[in-house]
Image: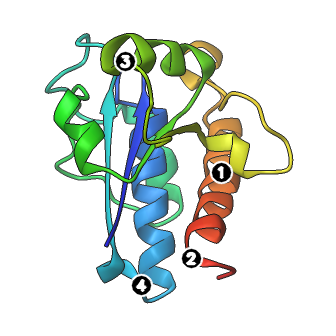
């Protein structure tokens, strides 16, 4: 079982998009039973809130449901439980370091480091551009899955 936890600031846009995109990718590849995939926030600002409506709509455009998902904050237990803790941007990485301490097991990474164009995932909370975020998330998830499981 491979366990992936996607991280962003509030857990209402980018990290849930990555969670549900990755769940669809592994389901489409017939390997969903080999994965546990979730998402969480570094902040407490949105805890209990559902996925942000424009992010939910972008997922729905691609036939992906995120029904029932509510924001939660990462915990120290998550560090022990998950194999991959995948942040959306450098600010998330700094917050994770502050919250979890040293990444002694080398579990924490940036999503787009699994692509040919490492950078932060576009933040639609500020840009309103959910299509750019969709593209970044898809590229990053595909690269991460290829790293974990080989070419799909």
Left or right, 141 with reference to 103: right
| Quarter containing the C terminus | bottom right
Residue density around tag 3, few if under 14, some if 14–19, many if 20 or more, within 10 Å: few
Q: For marks 2 and 4, give the CA distance.
A: 10 Å
Q: Earlier in the sequence, mark 3 or mark 4?
A: 4
Q: Earlier in the sequence, mark 4 or mark 1?
A: 4
Residue density around tag 2, few if under 14, some if 14–19, many if 20 or more, within 10 Å: few
- Contact, CB < 8 Å: mark 2 with mark 3? no
Q: Which residue was labeled with disc 4? A: 31
Q: Secondary structure at mark 2?
A: helix
Q: Earlier in the sequence, mark 2 or mark 1?
A: 1
| Residue 105 visible, this angle | yes
Q: For marks 2 and 1, give the CA distance.
A: 14 Å
- Contact, CB < 8 Å: mark 2 with mark 4? yes
Residue at 60 percent across and 24 percent down: it is 89
Q: Is residue 127 above or below residue 81?
A: above
Tell me where residue 36 sits by quadrant: bottom left
Q: For marks 4 and 1, give the CA distance.
A: 18 Å
Residue at 49 percent across and 20 percent down: it is 92
Q: Nearer the viewer, residue 24 or 90?
A: 90
């Amino acid at each position: 079982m491979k366990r992936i936890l996607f991280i962003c600031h509030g857990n209402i846009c980018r990290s849930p998009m990555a969670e549900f995109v990755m769940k669809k990718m592994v389901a489409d590849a017939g390997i969903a039973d080999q994965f546990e995939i979730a998402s969480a926030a570094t902040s407490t600002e949105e805890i209990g809130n559902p996925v942000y409506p424009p992010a939910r709509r972008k997922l729905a455009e691609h036939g992906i449901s995120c029904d029932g998902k509510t924001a939660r904050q990462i915990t120290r237990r998550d560090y022990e439980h998950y194999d991959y803790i995948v942040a959306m941007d450098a600010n998330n990485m700094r917050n994770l370091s502050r919250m979890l301490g040293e990444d002694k097991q080398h579990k924490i990474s940036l999503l787009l480091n699994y692509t040919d164009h490492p950078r932060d995932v576009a933040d639609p909370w500020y840009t309103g551009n959910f299509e750019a975020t969709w593209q970044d998330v898809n590229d990053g998830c595909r690269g991460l899955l290829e790293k974990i499981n080989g070419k799909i």
